[in-house]
């Protein structure tokens, strides 16, 4: 699995990231895959869709690995 960099605004939530990178098309889909344990942040399953992403977080979902950087 290759690591892809993604630049986000501070305060971006996990469910918003999944929509932004087109893993899902709706918030309901994002909620479903997050709560079913298909998403991990920094190697741990994350089930809170409102988790606020931080600089350096690594998100793994559906064979995609993303490294978060925050922009001002």
Image (cartoon, helix red, strand yellow):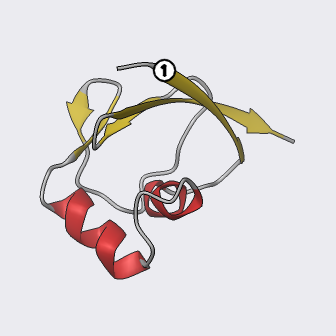
In the image as oriented, which residue stretches furthest toward the left?
Answer: 36
Residue drawn where x is 26% and y is 24% of the image: 43
Q: Is residue 51 left or right of residue 19?
A: left
Number of numbered labels in the structure image: 1
Q: Quadrant of residue 71?
A: top right
Residue drawn where x is 28% and y is 44% of the image: 62
In the image as oriented, which residue stretches furthest toward the right?
Answer: 72
The relative height of residue 22 versus residue 37 in the rendered view (above or below) is below
In the image as oriented, which residue stretches furthest toward the top?
Answer: 2
The residue singled out by tag 1 in the image is 3
Residue drawn where x is 55% and y is 53% of the image: 21
* SS for dot 1: strand
Label 1 neighbour load within 10 Å: few <14, some 14-19, many 20+: few
Q: Quadrant of the N terminus?
A: top left
Q: Is residue 44 left or right of residue 58?
A: left
Q: Is residue 50 left or right of residue 31?
A: right
Residue 9 lies, in percent from the top left, at: 74, 50
The relative height of residue 13 versus residue 66 in the rendered view (above or below) is below
Residue 55 lies, in percent from the top left, at: 62, 29
Q: Quadrant of the C terminus?
A: top right
Please name whichever residue, 4 or 17, is drawn nearer the observer in this view of the structure: 4
Q: Is residue 3 left or right of residue 43?
A: right
Residue 37 lies, in percent from the top left, at: 14, 50
Residue drawn where x is 23% and y is 61% of the image: 33
The relative height of residue 52 versus residue 42 in the rendered view (above or below) is below
Please name whichever residue, 63 or 9, is drawn nearer the observer in this view of the structure: 63
């Amino acid at each position: 699995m290759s690591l892809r960099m993604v630049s986000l605004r501070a305060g971006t939530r996990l469910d918003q990231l999944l929509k932004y990178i087109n893993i899902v098309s709706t918030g309901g889909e994002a909620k479903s895959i997050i709560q079913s344990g298909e998403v991990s942040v920094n190697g741990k399953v994350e089930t809170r869709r409102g988790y606020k992403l931080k600089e350096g977080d690594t998100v793994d979902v559906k064979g995609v690995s993303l490294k978060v950087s925050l922009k001002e």
